[in-house]
Image (tube, coloured by chain):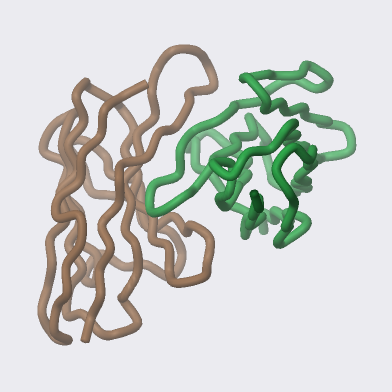
Amino acid sequence: EDKVVQSPLSLVVHEGDTVTLNCSYEVTNFRSLLWYKQEKKAPTFLFMLTSSGIEKKSGRLSSILDKKELFSILNITATQTGDSAVYLCAPGSGSARQLTFGSGTQLTVLP
Amino acid sequence: SAVISQKPSRDICQRGTSLTIQCQVDSQVTMMFWYRQQPGQSLTLIATANQGSEATYESGFVIDKFPISRPNLTFSTLTVSNMSPEDSSIYLCSVEVQGSIPYEQYFGPGTRLTVT
């Protein structure tokens, strides 16, 4: 059975801090790993990672994948209150292109 | 990316009734999916909506409870049948956007369902 574990489950920081969110996974026929930000209802796409060691960046957010150790991290530098959300990682597997979601990390950024 | 809309955005329904949720995409997509997110939980895949054939359901979900239609490449519906309070959830459709392989997956705005 596919398994995704995110840590920490929740995190409270102050504006300007840097955070690292972790995602470890065990899926059959791994294809890619996606990160999403969920503020209210709909998850918003952040990154898709397919290759080990290649960092993807978007502004203050960056992410990297390690396919040998089966984990990914999401970094957010100089956090802002608008970064407060649940961050979900979702490895995709197999030819059916389905995603398995982790339980998420609830990030709260205090002013 | 793709622009995805869902209707209704929220609803409050009585137990024993059914609700049909619509998902519309602004471009043709091959893969459409339906997810459920129960309160305090992460997203769980209900089924893959296949155009022109029956949906493919995940373990624990059945067609009688969650019938799905996919009449074309831009539209799908999910019906939650004979609802009970345990069906109170956010229901989300997602689509796979073809830009590169593997494909990125984007979500609609969601439907928040409360069953009383």
Q: Is residue A86 left or right of residue A4?
A: left
Residue A7 appears at what percent x and percent y? 77, 55
Residue placed at 67% from the left, 28% from the top?
A61
Residue A93 visible in this rendered orientation of the protein: no
Task: Residue A11: name its quadrant.
Answer: bottom right
Task: Residue B25: name its quadrant.
Answer: top left
| Residue ranking furthest to the top | B99
| Quarter of the N terminus of chain A within the rendering | bottom right
Residue B64 appears at what percent x and percent y? 21, 70
Chain B shown in which color? brown
| Residue ranking furthest to the right | A69
Residue placed at 51% from the left, 70% from the top?
B40
Q: Looking at this view, is A74 or B76 the one in front?
A: A74
Residue A22 appears at what percent x and percent y? 78, 46
Q: Is residue B77 left or right of residue A106?
A: left
Residue placed at 73% from the left, 36% from the top?
A74
* Number of numbered markers: 0
Residue B18 visible in this rendered orientation of the protein: yes
Quick check: B36 above or below A52? below
Q: Looking at this view, is B6 or B104 the one in front?
A: B6
Residue placed at 50% from the left, 42% from the top?
A98
Chain A shown in which color? green
Quick check: A2 above or below A93? below
Q: Looking at this view, is B47 or B114 the one in front?
A: B114
Task: Residue B5: name its quadrant.
Answer: top left
Q: Is residue A70 left or right of residue B53?
A: right
